[in-house]
Amino acid sequence: MTDALPAARPRRLKEMWPQEVRAALDADPRLLVPVGACAPHGDHLPLGADTLIADRLADDLSRLSGVVRAPSVEYGVNAPHASPAAGSAGVRKKTLHRLLNDLLASWEACGVREFVLLTAHAHDPHQEALATVVTNVARVRVVDVFAVDVRDLLEGQDEPMHADEVDTSLLLHLAPELVRPEGALDYMVERATLRRFRQGHGRGALSATAVLGRPSMASAAKGKALYERIVGRIATRVLDVPPERLTAL
């Protein structure tokens, strides 16, 4: 669907009238669905860091592609933590799965024929809830923001971790007023420990502040480079946006 036109602003479903949605879906029957989380990200990032990233990404992808974006799902499947942070809240894998099944069924009945589920929450049970959503005829594509290769942009890590150099840099770029750099404490672990954490078996892998990685290496400039890489890859490879449109970022 390379002939879709970019929009002057994001096409946010919650701000549109039914007739506008009908016209948009007739022109391009895809829907962006950001799925976030409300989970601790150290003493330096807000609980909704994952949602903030996915939400902004959905806006920019909608603007670049003209595809309608759904309201963000604010809660996901959280990793286990020995002492949950105040305010954090998650749902079980089957709960998220059922919620998305119901939402996608409603939108599919309205004519959506392809769903792009965007998430910046790299927790396997969370991702499994998204990957196992069932539709009648519509295609479902799950896009993990952190699956984009950004290794060449990192200094203190070999890959994205949690509340780390990547998350912190992205938030310094997207919402610097919500970052408290003085609270950033590094906590490096071996890759096997990171893998157990992502699988949901690493209750003891997290630091006391839920950090894995080197947030002290973060910067706004790095966040800008990371964000532009992520947007560019998803826009061109998933949404078929012509590369020349990326200058609009």
Image: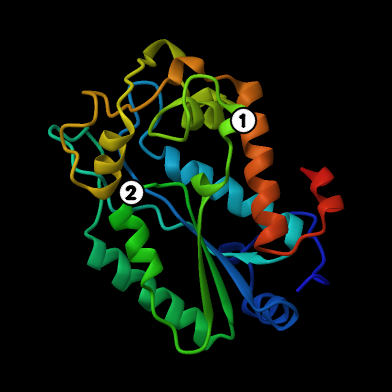
Q: Which residue is mark 1?
A: 152
| Left-right relation of 209 to 157 | left
Which quarter of the picture shows residue 82? top left
Which quarter of the picture shows residue 99? bottom left
Report the residue that reaches farthest toward the right: 244
> Mark 1 falls on what kind of element?
helix
- Does the image show residue 213? yes
Kind of residue indicated by mark 1: Asp
Residue at the spot 54% in from the left edge and 20% down from the top edge: 155
Report the residue that reaches farthest toward the left: 82
Q: Which mark is residue 123?
A: 2
Callout 1 crowding tier (Cα within 10 Å): few <14, some 14–19, many ≥20: few
- Does the image show residue 180? no
> Mark 2 falls on what kind of element?
loop
**x, y percent for residue 184:** 39, 16
| Left-right relation of 82 to 98 | left
